[in-house]
Image (tube, rainbow, N blue to C red):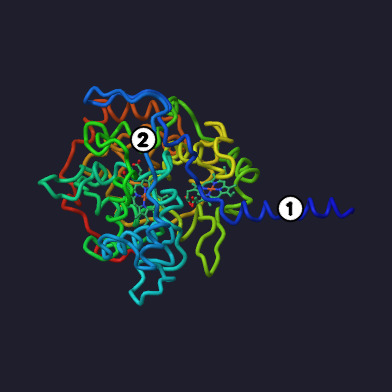
Amino acid sequence: MNTLKKLYCVVLLFFAATALADPRIQARPADYLLSGSLVLSSGQVLPAGTRWYQAPDIERLKHEVADASFRGDLTEARRIVFGYDLITNTYATIGEGRQDGQPPLAQGKIMNCSSCHAQGGTVPFAYAFFRTLSFFGLREQGDKGVYFEGLAYHRDARTRARDCGRECGGPVMLTDNSYEMDGLISWLKVVRDGIYPGEGLLFDAFKHKADQAKIPGAQIPLFPKVMEMTSDPLSGKSIYDTHCLRCHEAKGAGQWSDSRGYLVPPLAGKGSFSQAGGPLMIPVGAAFIHRNMPPDNPGLLSQQEALDVMGYVASLPRPSVWWQDYFHRHNPCARPAYLPLHVGTVPREFPFSKQQAQFGPWQAISDWLSSDACKASNPAIPAALEWDFTTLTPIW
Ligand code: HEC
Ligand code: HEC
């Protein structure tokens, strides 16, 4: 091999290595500009191309806290930094890797909240936190939170975050009134309002109920025709081997570093999202994958391929949580058509197979669930966990 070729190989290897060293999901510059014009409920028209968001400059805040040059509430600034680290470096901040002498809130190897809530929840279409605080609230001005059909109780921003930690995050046991939760809430505030002037949501309207659903990418829409589609996990396995294996490893094990935690999060087993996690529902998980994976080439997979590969991922073994059996027990006909039957209460007389409920097509299931036939055999009953649900019993 001549020297030039050797050099070329070294450079290629270098890029391959750095691509793997930080393969996280990034916002693309156009993500923060409106792709079409948008009418606010006040009648104000925002033309296409309008910038609507500016991510908070957390690195600047970290520097200013470290060298004490921050001009503002230093206690709050420290809380914000802690909340950001909690989301983006979860194992080292609140897991067994924490160095502050406090008891860990999770056991063993756990992934980051930002494995799904990319860049601390500031990337559109990657389970962003733009609307979270305004939508769920903090029960401040008499607001009760948002009714959660699955367990029939109202969730505020704290209990919503707590539930996600337990069901999706590995599990993580955040408690309602704790330093950790306060840090998380401070970070959610900053995602919405920014740290420095000119940051956060750039239109106040987006912080209010009437317009928060218009924030681009605050939620990930399902594929328009998904209810008629079917997921093929066998074809998903070969898509996985071609496009996912190089990072997520065999059987979705992920890549772990003792000093840095998960470099690539696990898609199965302990430390991964549980059977009660939203992405287990194939249309939900597929929408995230289609938009964000692989992170160095997002949009590579077709909708069908994303549905198939999520079918394979959903079939891998993963932890369960005891309260998943209570989902929709009070009203089984209200369960999502694509919730697998091993989660939640199955309505009496349910005429579809386990296979179809998990892998589709789901339209006929959805029609039956909303029919009088379902309601006739499954009258609603009082909820088993209807109070503001707490899990005082440890789940590991
Ligand atoms: C495996 C992926 C995954 C992980 C890891 C994860 N979440 Fe979530 N999270 C989700 C999904 C899916 C939703 C529901 C999004 C929706 O309804 O649009 C969600 C919703 C939330 C919400 C409500 C957001 C909103 O505006 O509706 C909060 C807050 C939250 N998660 C906090 C956390 C915290 C804290 C952690 C870490 C301890 C965490 N999540 C880890 C997938 C994940
Ligand atoms: C270049 C490496 C890479 C490739 C290839 C890749 N991923 Fe990921 N994946 C990641 C990283 C890193 C994250 C965490 C994102 C972050 O921290 O911003 C992630 C996150 C995820 C998540 C959410 C977190 C979790 O653990 O549930 C899912 C689901 C996922 N990937 C599925 C896939 C699928 C399916 C494929 C193949 C189509 C794929 N990924 C390809 C690196 C990769």
- Find the residue positioned furthest to the right: 2
Q: Secondary structure at mark 2?
A: loop
Compared across the picture, whether 247 is left or right of 99 comes to right
Q: Are marks 2 and 1 in contact (CB under 8 Å)?
A: no
- Find the residue positioned furthest to the bottom: 101
Q: Secondary structure at mark 1?
A: helix
Residue 254: x %, y % from top left? 55, 57
Residue 183: x %, y % from top left? 29, 60
Instruction: Report the front residue among 360 and 236.
Output: 236
Q: Let me know if residue 29 appears in the view.
A: yes
- Find the residue positioned furthest to the left: 142
* Residue at (55, 63) in percent of width and height: 256
Circle 1 is placed at which residue position?
11
- Residue 52 got which mark? 2
Q: Let me know if residue 333 appears in the view.
A: no
Dot 2, crowdedness within 10 Å: few (<14), some or many (≥20)? some
Residue 129: x %, y % from top left? 34, 45
Q: Is residue 387 above or below residue 378?
A: below
- Marks 2/1: CA–CA distance: 38 Å
* Residue at (36, 38) in percent of width and height: 218
> Which quadrant does the C terminus fall into?
bottom left
Compared across the picture, whether 131 is left or right of 263 comes to left
Going by the numbered disc 1, the residue's amino acid type is Val
* Residue at (17, 49) in percent of width and height: 386
Compared across the picture, whether 219 is left or right of 176 comes to right
Q: Is residue 132 above or below residue 38?
A: below
Q: Earlier in the sequence, mark 2 or mark 1?
A: 1
Going by the numbered disc 2, the residue's amino acid type is Trp
* Residue at (48, 28) in percent of width and height: 229
Instruction: Report the front residue among 316 and 143.
Output: 143
